[in-house]
């Protein structure tokens, strides 16, 4: 019997699709295969964008560098854990800077905290700081 070494997926491999997409490359997207990265989506049509992050959870032995469990995709949408496959369908790749800006927008603009209703984006532009 051959002892298989379980090497974790590298960060470069994990974020390749997202990095290429954000840089403007048209990369094929598979509907049920979420990719780690930073995204935005709307919870309802006409609603504000909310931040989405997808990442690969890895349990790695600190001594050997090998995986101690299967890798699994995780996601957070608007601060709540969620199913990466479900959120992936509507997610648009954005830069890490845009993601950081979106994560704080609810505190800066109270109307943006209402994520389950459409909003008047023209009125929002008028009140921007």
Image (tube, grey):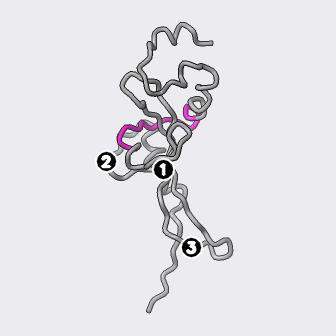
Around disc 3, counting alpha carbons within 10 Å, would you say few (fewer than 14), some (14 to 19), or many (20 or more)?
A: some
Residue in the image at 59% along x and 29% along y: 101
125 vs 27, left or right, is right
Q: Which residue is mark 1?
A: 36
List x then y, in percent, for residue 39: 47, 38
Q: Closer to the N terminus: mark 1 or mark 2?
A: 2
* Crowding near the residue tagged with mark 1, few <14, some 14–19, many ≥20 C-alpha atoms within 10 Å: many
Do labels 3 and 2 touch, CB within 8 Å?
A: no
Query: Of label 3 and label 2, which has the lower sequence position?
Result: 2
Question: Residue 111: percent from the left, percent from the top?
Answer: 54, 18
Magenta stretch, residue numbers: 88-99
Q: Quadrant of the C terminus?
A: top right
Q: Secondary structure at mark 1?
A: loop
Q: Secondary structure at mark 2?
A: loop
| Residue 87 screen position, x and y as percent | 41, 43
Q: Nearer the viewer, mark 3 or mark 1?
A: 3
Position of residue 107 in the picture relative to residue 11 (left or right):
right
Q: Secondary structure at mark 3?
A: loop
Q: Residue at x 47, y 56 (%)?
A: 73
Q: Which mark is residue 105?
A: none
**How far, Cα to Cα, is label 1 from label 2?**
14 Å
Query: Which of disc 1 and disc 3 is earlier in sequence?
Result: 1
- Magenta stretch containing residue 75, yes or no? no
Reading the image, the residue beneath label 3 is 68
Image quadrant occupied by the N terminus: bottom left
Q: Position of residue 109 (x, y in %)?
A: 59, 19
Cβ atoms under marks 1 and 2 closer than 8 Å = no
Question: For this view, does 79 lie left or right of residue 28?
Answer: right
Q: CA distance from mark 3 to mark 1?
A: 20 Å
Q: Which residue is mark 2?
A: 31
């Amino acid at each position: 019997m051959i002892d298989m070494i379980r090497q974790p997926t590298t960060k470069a491999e994990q974020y390749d699709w997202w990095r290429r997409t954000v840089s403007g490359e048209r990369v094929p997207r598979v509907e049920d295969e979420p990719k780690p990265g930073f995204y935005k989506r709307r919870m309802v049509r006409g609603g504000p964008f909310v931040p989405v992050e997808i990442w690969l959870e890895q349990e790695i032995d600190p001594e050997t560098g090998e995986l101690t469990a299967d890798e699994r995709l995780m996601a957070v949408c608007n601060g709540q854990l969620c199913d990466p496959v479900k959120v992936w369908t509507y997610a648009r790749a954005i830069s890490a800077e845009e993601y950081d800006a979106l994560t704080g927008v609810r505190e800066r603009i109270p109307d943006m905290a209402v994520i389950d209703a459409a909003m008047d984006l023209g009125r929002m532009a008028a009140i921007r700081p």
